[in-house]
Amino acid sequence: MLNLNSFDASRYPLWLMVGLLMASSQLASAAQASIDRPFIGAADIVVRALESSAITIKERADTDRFVILYAEGEAQQSVAITLFALPQQSDRMTVTVNSASPADQHFDHQLLQVEAFNPLSSVKDRLAYAVIKDALDKGTLAPGQTVIEATSGNTGIALAMVCAVMGHPFVATMAESFSVERRKIMRALGAKVILTPAAERGSGMVKRAEELAAKHNWFLTRQFENPANPAYHANTTGPEILRDFAGERLDYWVSGWGTGGTLSGAGRVMKAARPDLKVVATEPEQAALLSGGDWSPHKIQGWTPDFIPSVLDREVADMIVTINDEESMANALKIAQQEGIFTGISGGATLTAALKVADQAEAGSVILAMLPDTAERYMSTPLFADINEGSDDEWLDSL
Ligand SMILES: Cc1ncc(COP(=O)(O)O)c(C=O)c1O
């Protein structure tokens, strides 16, 4: 049994750290080299990188979520290395929930599709590559032409990455209500970010992107209307899940919607292949547009703008489940603290909807929930409001 808590980087020689850095830079370049589908960290690449350094892999333990390597180096110092967030199988993004839901729910059968495994840590990496490749193939995007999109952040971050790789300047228009870290990540990737007033909502940032595209002859990717968006999910996300669950039970698939690309594209092919599968759409209580409600501001960044996008195929959803901001944030923190799965507010929201489905579902049902991104994108938001920034002295004193 390996004691994972004993790994202390400062105790190990420099060459080991170089080995780990090499491994992570190989992951990064692999992410770009194999861009024709979003790259998912393959443990084998890290193992190869370690093997080519002076380290011998003594033991390798593959768990459902992690690959644990027990390695020994030249100095005969034993080290245990946990490669967090590397899925056991290089292309499976599904993890099992172990402890986050109450015992009376069908706990062993809650599964999470962790889209944070994508290179820039959200489901939107798929869309970004899809719309740029489609436009280049059709000739509607010229080499080197500036790209612009209206985004709640994840699409912008993903487009900033793809545009950096493919040599296009990128401009995002984004409502000022979305988290400040999103702006900074985009800018760090070389993009420009034009903020629009929160009061103008999602449609305000879309309008601004349209105006700027027309004025400067920039290419507008139109994520809310572009058929390449759901088409890519129909070609990748849906088939990946079908392959992962081939020969296995899968009763419900739960997804929120922002553009509706994931829900419509993946949902459509999954239903065609598995007619018994129930597709569950989830949306905020105070912006339950698919349920016929009115829109009012909510905290699930990336979900439910103040309009129903044209790429969203309403026929795909068999059920609609509403959730609220508080339960979504509570569940996002709960799976972080109980499962080590670090997802954003929309991930907590999808998990909340999945737990509501589990309440009603027949015993033994298998429910897969989409977790669109990572919690690191939410440090400045209410999700982290109660997370202490200072020293935990009070806690220490109470011991
Ligand atoms: C955090 C987050 N969750 C979910 C979604 C929704 O994905 P889709 O646009 O495919 O409906 C988005 C979209 O921006 C998002 O940023």
Image (cartoon, rainbow, N blue to C red):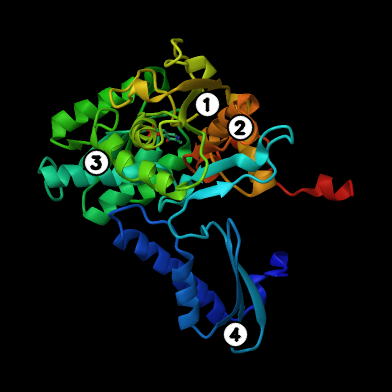
Residue placed most toward the observer, 60 or 23: 60
- Pointer 2 with pointer 3, Cβ within 8 A: no
Q: In which quadrant of the rendered view does residue 268 lie?
A: top left
Q: Is residue 276 at all visible to an observer of this figure?
A: yes
Residue on which the image places disc 1: 299
For marks 4 and 1, the one nearer the N-term is 4
Mark 4 crowdedness (10 Å alpha carbons): few <14, some 14-19, many ≥20: some
- Pointer 4 with pointer 2, Cβ within 8 A: no
Q: Amino acid at mark 4?
A: Gly
Tell me if the residue at label 3 has its CB under 8 Å from ligand 1. Answer: no
Q: Is residue 147 left or right of residue 190?
A: left
Residue placed most toward the observer, 385 or 12: 12
For marks 3 and 1, the one nearer the N-term is 3
Measured Cα–Cα span from mark 3 to mark 1: 27 Å
Task: Give the residue drawn at x 18%, y 37%.
Answer: 219
For marks 2 and 1, the one nearer the N-term is 1
Residue on which the image places disc 4: 73
Residue on which the image places disc 3: 131
> Residue 9: x percent and y percent?
63, 71
Q: Is residue 303 above or below residue 168?
A: above
Task: Give the residue drawn at x 52%, y 86%.
Answer: 54
- Pointer 2 with pointer 1, Cβ within 8 A: yes
Callout 3 secondary element? helix
Callout 2 secondary element? helix
Q: Amino acid at mark 2?
A: Met
